[in-house]
Each structure stands twice: as structure tokens, then as C-alpha cells.
Amino acid sequence: TKLDDFPENFLWGAASAAYQIEGGWKEDGKGSSIWDTFSKIPGKTYKGTNGNVAVDHYHRYKEDVKLMADMGLRAYRFSVAWSRILPNGSGEINDKGLQFYENLIDELRKYNIEPVLTLYHWDIPQALQDAYQGWESRQAIDDFNEYARVLFKRFKNKVKYWVTFNEQNVFTALGYRWEAHPPNIANVKKMFEANHIINLANAKAIQSFRELVPNGRIGPSFGYGPIYPFDSNPNHVLAALNGEEFQNHWWMDVYIHGKYPKVIWKQLERLGVTPTIESGDMELLQSVKPDFLGVNYYHGGTVRANKIEFPLKDEEQQLDKDFEATDPYLMEPKEEQAQSPEVPMFTNVSNPYLEKTDWGWEIDPIGMRIALRRLQSRYDLPMMITENGLGAFDELTENREIEDQYRIDYLREHLVEIQKAITDGVDVIGYCAWSFTDLLSWLNGYRKRYGFVYIDRDDENEKSLERIPKKSYYWYKNIIKTNGKSL
Ligand code: GCO
């Protein structure tokens, strides 16, 4: 089949997050966030790296936006640091913080780059964590709403696209289950409670948005990956259905339909970890619907039936071992519970058909098309790819260039699958590659690079922080210029 062209106003973009690029962590009245605290706990991040300086975007945003403009970028997704706007989380507004984002937005608009503003990219103010344990308390719903309303009012005429929460599935799992992100907790019950509270915060902020920004577009960005069965054994197919509902629809159904999937709800009931539903909660969740779905796509997952009832065959042992470190949340009870109702719904394995990145992430461009197709069928909303990209060890050549052909290949293969999905009939409105410049990887320091623009710094030294466009920068520039025809 001949492929359809990308839509005329397709938002060719790139993305970032405040903590990963800004630096200026105490500048102009900014308060601390939970990441400012957590990254300083010994052993939590690679070589103790943190975002105190990051890539100094706070001071160099004009230079960065100029590079975007020279590239022809049509959209730039960034996040606002809540603790710049409300240093104590609520109450006093810090105008200098607002001014920074206003300057950034004005600079983008000067070059006709559409700002895509993320309200929450993982950095709740430390003051709210101290006051009431952050997302564990319902007070966070009102405080988040207050923060969102400040931004809605200030930027309603300058920003059309808004993202509420970035990868709620990722930050709640890593933060409340795996002690890998702040608030550094390992408690499944708390994870589900916090999730529910964040769902309510999401809905309430969207209510405010309808009132204050009637012509804007808002939606969450979800870290989505399609779940595949290990093979056509119906037991594995059923496990994949469980995985898909548990790892994806548990969140997305709430965003779009205001309800939790019944099958997973019953499983959580059996485990005694359902969140507390108060009267009015479900009505609030059902009262709003996003305008679009932000999809962060890196890879999917492959699962098999649980290994207690369906023991592994010899040849499956290695696939299983690869994933031992990342068992899916609570779906893997201890062996002694095997006879209880807590039979795991699925077991993650690695996919024998897929190559991996330097960081062990599966490379699966077709999964992008499958993702878009599944989400279009289930939710029927326009979609924006709000993240997709390759983390790699980029090395400067003698001429101080970056020959990142591997990144070009990766992005091109994913974009071709997006074009195929569009040809299939999926409504995709934009693509924000992750990321524009290199930035701080939350747990992996500065050596895991994603950007179109190299930053001269490493984990120990800030060095010159010079910006050096990579080969992929010029490649993407041409893709944008031809509206994808040169793919
Ligand atoms: C990393 C991650 C991030 C995420 C992003 C999620 O290495 O730290 O890949 O960069 O992609 O922050 O929204």
C-alpha cells in the first residue's frame, strides 16, 4: 500500500522535563522538590548525579530555543517545576518562576514553535511531601488544582496543548513500590492509594481547565507499551490480556472512561490493595474526558502464563532470568502463596525476536503501530506521541561531531510505523522525540544521552555545557522540512 502523507499541521516536536534540563535549583526563589532531596541520598542515582545544574537550560533557554528554531521544530514539550511557581507547594506565588516560563513560551512563539506544557513531570514540592506525604494525601488534589489554575490563568492565551501527568504508571510504581524514585517507598497498598489520588487530581485539574481555558487541549501522557503473549498457547494469550489490562488499561480506562477495569479491580480486592473510594470520587472521574491522549512509547512487554501453574520449559529459562529483576508489581506472589487466590496473572519474559539498546530496552518499532492501533480502537481519541527516542552512549569524534546514525535509524523506523498507523486510519496529531538536548537521566546520570543536541558535560564535571548539534539534528530538520516525505 502507498502510505498516506503526514497530516499538514503535524506537530513535529521534541520533549524535555524541568528537572532533567533546567538546573538553577535554588534560583529566583525556587523551592525544593522531592527530586532535589532524593537525588542526594547516597546510592540512589548513578554516581550521585543530580539536577542542581543539569544542562543549565534555566540560563541558556534562548540559545536552546534558537537551536529549535534553526531546526524548524514545530512543537516543544517541556514541563513546569511546581516548586518554581509555588515554592511551598501552595500559598505564595513566586512571580519570578512564572516569568521564566513566560519568557520561554514567548521565545518559542516568536519562532512559531507550539508549546506543549506538562504540569507534572515527577517533581512535587518537598514542602508538600513534608506536610502531608504528598500524593498519599487528598490535600494534594486541591494543591495541584491550585497550581494548575495559576498556570491556566497565566498562559491560557499562549499555550494550547497541555499535559496533566507524565507517566503516572512509571512514577507511582518506581516511587511507591520499588524505592527507585522518591518518595522511596515499598508498599503496594500505598502505590494504589496514591494512584487513585493522582487520578482525582487529574480530573479536578481538567475541570478547572474547561472553565479557564475553553479553547485549549489537555490530556495525560501515559507510558504505554503493548503486551504480547510469549506464543500462541492460549494460556499465554490470556496472560497477555491480563498484562495489558494491568499495566495499561488500569490507568487509561480511568482517564478516558472514569472507571477501573473490573478484572483488575477484583484481583486487587483479592490481594487487599484496592484504593479507598470515597463518595463522589467516581462521579469526579467520570465528569471529564481528555481531548487527546499523550503516548510515551519506548517498548512493550512480553508475558507468559505464571510459572507456578505453568512451569517454564528449559528453553524459556534464560528469557525468564533476564526479567527477574523487574517482576511486575504485585503479580508475582511468593511461592508459598501459590495455592492462595493470589495466583499471578502473568510473568514477564524477554522477547526473543527483539534487539535491545545499550540500556537493555527492547527495540520494537512495529510495537509503535500496534500501540497506536490498540489505543485508537479502545479509546478513539486523537493521539500525540509525547515521547519516543533512543538512550545511547554518544562519543564526540576528533572533529567534535556526533555521528549518531543509530539514533537516526531508530527514529526513522518508529516514524515509518507511525506513518503506517496513520495510513491504517489512526489519528496522530504530533510526535515529540525524546529529547531535544541531552539531559539528566533520572537514575543513569548524564552518560545516557537521548538528544538531537549534544551537551558538553559528564557525570562528574559540568565542563563547558556547549551545545553541539548531532547528525540526527540535521536529519530531523530535513524530515520536518519535507513533512516526513524524506523518511
Ligand atoms: C531516563 C528516562 C527518562 C524518561 C522521561 C520519561 O533515562 O531517565 O528515559 O528520560 O524517558 O523522563 O518521561
Image (cartoon, helix red, strand yellow):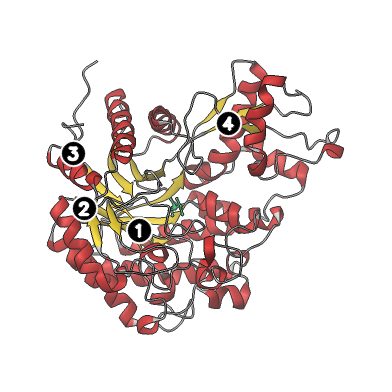
Disc 4 vs disc 1: which is toward the camera?
Answer: 4
The answer for how far apart the CA atoms under marks 3 and 1 are is 35 Å
Q: Quadrant of residue 56?
A: bottom left
- Please state which amino acid type lies under the numbered disc 2: Asn
Instruction: Look at the picture and state if 466 lies above or below 487.
Output: below
Residue 350's disc number: 4
All told, the count of numbered labels is 4
Residue that badge 1 annotates: 210
Determine whether, in the image, residue 340 is placed left or right of residue 449. Answer: right
Q: Quadrant of residue 158?
A: bottom left
Q: Earlier in the sequence, mark 2 or mark 3?
A: 2
- Please state which amino acid type lies under the numbered disc 1: Arg
- Please state which amino acid type lies under the numbered disc 3: Ile
Q: Is mark 4 within 8 Å of ligand 1?
A: no
Q: Rate crowding at label 3 as few (under 14), some (14 to 19) or many (20 or more) other CA atoms within 10 Å.
A: some
Residue visible at 24% across and 55% down?
A: 400
The answer to the question of whether label 1 and label 2 lie on touching residues, with beta carbons closer than 8 A, is: no
Q: Nearer the viewer, residue 327 or 91?
A: 327
Residue 479's disc number: 3
Residue that badge 2 annotates: 399
